[in-house]
Image (cartoon, rainbow, N blue to C red):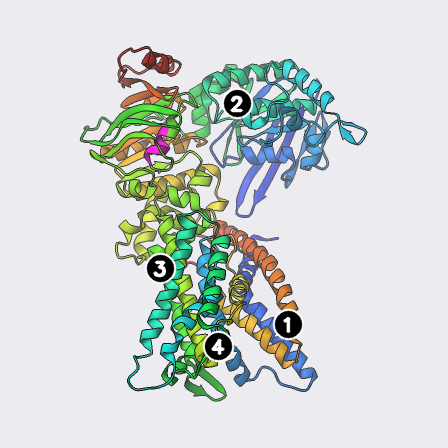
Amino acid sequence: MSGKTSVFSKRLLKIVTDFSSLLILAAVFLFFEAANALNGDHYLTLSNISVILNQSCFLTIIGVAQALVILTGGLNLSIGSVMAFTTVMWGRMLVGNSPDSVHYLVPMAIIVGAGMAIGLVNGLLITKLKMPPFIATFATMFACRGMAWLALGKKVIYNLNSDFRYLGTGVVERLGAFSITVPMIIVFLLLLGTSFLLTRTNFGRRIYFTGSNPVAARFSGIPTDRVIIWVYVLSTGLAAFAGLLYGARLNSFEPGMATQAPFEAITVALIGGIAITGGFGNIWGVLCGSVIVSTIYNGMNSLSVASELQTLVMGGLIIFAVAFNQFLIKQNMELRNELDDSAPDRTRRPAPGEA
Amino acid sequence: MTAPLLEFRHISKSFPGVKALEDVSVDLRAGEVHVIVGENGAGKSTLMKLLSGAYAADEGELLLEGTPLRKNSPKISEQIGIAMIYQELTLVPELSVADNIFLGHEIHKGPLLNRREMERRTEALLASIGIAVSPRTLLRNLSIANQQMIEITKALSKNAKIIVFDEPTSSLTSAEIAELFRIIAALREKGVGMFYISHRLEEIFEIGDRVTIMRDGKRISTTAIAQTSMDRIVEGIAGRRIENVYTRTPSERGETLFALRNLSGGVFKNVSLQVRSGEIVGVAGLVGSGRSEVARAAFGIDAYKSGDVLVRGKPLPRGNPQTASRAGIAFLPEDRKREGLALSLPIRENTVISALSRLNPRGIIRRRKERAAVQKYVDDLEISTPTVEKLTNFLSGGTQQKVVLAKWLLSQAHTFIFDEPTRGIDIGSKSNIYSLMDELVRQGAGILMISSELPEVLGMSDRIYVMAQGRIAGELSREEANHYAVIQLAFSRPEAAAEGGTPDER
């Protein structure tokens, strides 16, 4: 094998592993397109793509919330119940359209703030009481769900403020059958912001370093406790924000909402290429992960797959995602190393997709 | 003429982008210690990995007692009597000595383990090389040195004919090294052929029969130890003449940057010392004398009971590496892989991690500045890498250590605590590191250097504290210090002296 072709094929392979999530997405699209074609339907319409992207927005937000924590080597199981608890507690302030009521941004700020406060509790349990993240957030998961039920019982908060609902349902622009919705804009801005935070700030660097080797991080003078606490504050605050968007779309808040959210968030983050061991992954992958999961849900619905079976499929998908993801991360690192070795000079520009 | 025990014949091996071995021919006779020296990345480990079956050669062949070895794998190499003794031990701390020695080739009596027989044989093996350890002791209760002896015994239990020692003395004290050499001599008598890899050149003359120098994947020379000299070996390794490894320019002493006042904790007691601007202060002593523990407590990694850590005269709050780091202290830990690097991140991100606030005071990364800063230290330290984007996971041990060093140099601390700064580092890089240390103190930094390598301590330090039994046994100026004085203090018993009511030595 001559050196040139092998470098070329490696470069190609690296691009494949860099954008593996996109390739999986394409495969999933093709699968449902073919399956629907058998019934004489057309799956990949512009309007359906728009629907899928809109549905994936919520998943992306909780996926980002989860990914932030996973990058530090942690886990956040409290995501779903924080959504329920915070919105149920203060959601009444978002009901109706009376002119004398406070601006809808005020309750939103309170709810996100409450989420951050719970995140602070998560962070303190993990860093100061040295509880494993799984246990600490498991506990807050139960506590928050319990408080949500205590606060509202079997009632539901509905008929929400229409300005507020616009955040979850509004359409900014129609391009033919494709609608650009407000959630899409919000998610895009969130990803831009998170990506900047992770790759272009000192804080982001510390997140990756802490996740990659917490001992070395401490020895390097990184305030690891503070980094971890902040990450849980952001993650859990983001969960509360996701709860708001969720409620805005459904026009209701209820204590039993989003019980699957933390697990869906893990699925999305892992499919998106975030290493469960921490310290490795690109936040844009989460977008891919959530679009893949949304497409599979949407596609199964288009084929009228029973919901029990859908749950089973998701289980299989998680197993596949984690195994495949670990394999790809290893491959990607090795390819990157080999390419580094054959790089002609030291001033190589970072390849796309590098964290 | 009988065939040598083992022969590498015209071996070549390439990895993507690197020619690791190029036409290397080396042989090993029965009953000899064949030393292999060379810088990190010279190809020593690759050669040994061909022997252990971890790699296969691209070209050339391996002959065992004159017969070519067609195929090799870790299992085959074990069966034909090749054993490896690595720096990192491969024993199970929770098992007994006998269990460890017979792990994987246990003696059975029906379906059950024949524990008594294994213990009896272990005892005989231990006795045959003169190690006084009970077969029933749990391995974790043994010193590192004794654990290594058990590793050797394990190799003997499998009737190893060839033993490879890879840096066996890097974590041993002088007394333990003497013990190891006694055992190696005993093995030589038994006709075992041994490859011995070490960066400690003094040892070669003590234990070796022949020495092979490797550089850039090629064999430079093989000579009998009796017919060579230290200078010639060093030149051969470096490929150039190294005049003086230790660079020290006299520099002006300034204020006291860092001090410990009566620090007491786990294994150390009443430790007081000072480091002034412009000086390198060595801390010598045997392994286990509490040197590293003092440093770790001072940097806030471990807790201490009483006493103070003073930075520029002000007490440093305890138990927080972050405040120590912010106060301008840098700590280069002994175990760099575990405590120094984030292996999934590139050289660039590892290097800047402790300097982020300084490089980017507004919290937002300035890429061009960062890249330039990293590149400067990669060049200064001669970190061999094609790009600063290379993941540290894929660097060789010595290169990894340099990255950790670069991290602290970039942090611009004023006091550096080095715990074994050149352990496992090749000669060429060593002298780089020494001249960097020299430059640091000339620019007004203070260095506290913990080291087990006496020549290094003597060559680099302006003052030397010698620790023994967790206490400072004495302090020597550069003029007073010599091998003899340091060793005498290291073996002294300051505890007895302190309890006997004699005045404090400090």
Left or right of residue B274: residue B41: right
Q: Residues within 10 Å of mark 4 (few under 14, many from 20)?
A: few
Question: Label 2 marks which chain's residue?
Answer: B
Identify the residue shown where x is 34% and y is 13%.
B499
Q: From the top left corner, tell me how far across and down residue B100 is, in percent.
A: 64, 28
Residue underneath mark 3: A200
Left or right of residue B267: residue A321: right
Residue underneath mark 4: A155
Q: Are marks 2 and 3 on the same chain?
A: no
Disc number lying in front (4 or 3):
4
Question: Label 4 marks which chain's residue?
Answer: A
Identify the residue shown where x is 48% and y is 40%.
B396
Q: From the top left corner, tell me how far across and down residue B176 is, in percent.
A: 50, 18
Q: CA distance from mark 4 to mark 3?
A: 45 Å
Q: CA distance from mark 1 to mark 2?
A: 59 Å
Q: CA distance from mark 4 to mark 1?
A: 28 Å
Does residue A5 show up? no
Give the mark nearest the N terminus, 4 or 3: 4
Residue underneath mark 1: A310
Q: Are marks 1 and 3 on the same chain?
A: yes
Is disc 4 placed on a helix, strand or loop? Answer: loop
Mark drawn on residue B145: 2
Q: Residues within 10 Å of mark 2 (few under 14, many from 20)?
A: some
> Do tag 1 and tag 2 residues touch (Cβ < 8 Å)?
no
- Tell whether position B413 is magenta: no
Specify start and end residues of the magenta stretch as a single range.
B294-299
Amino acid, disc 4: Lys
Q: CA distance from mark 4 to mark 2?
A: 70 Å
> Do tag 2 and tag 3 residues touch (Cβ < 8 Å)?
no
Is disc 2 placed on a helix, strand or loop? Answer: helix
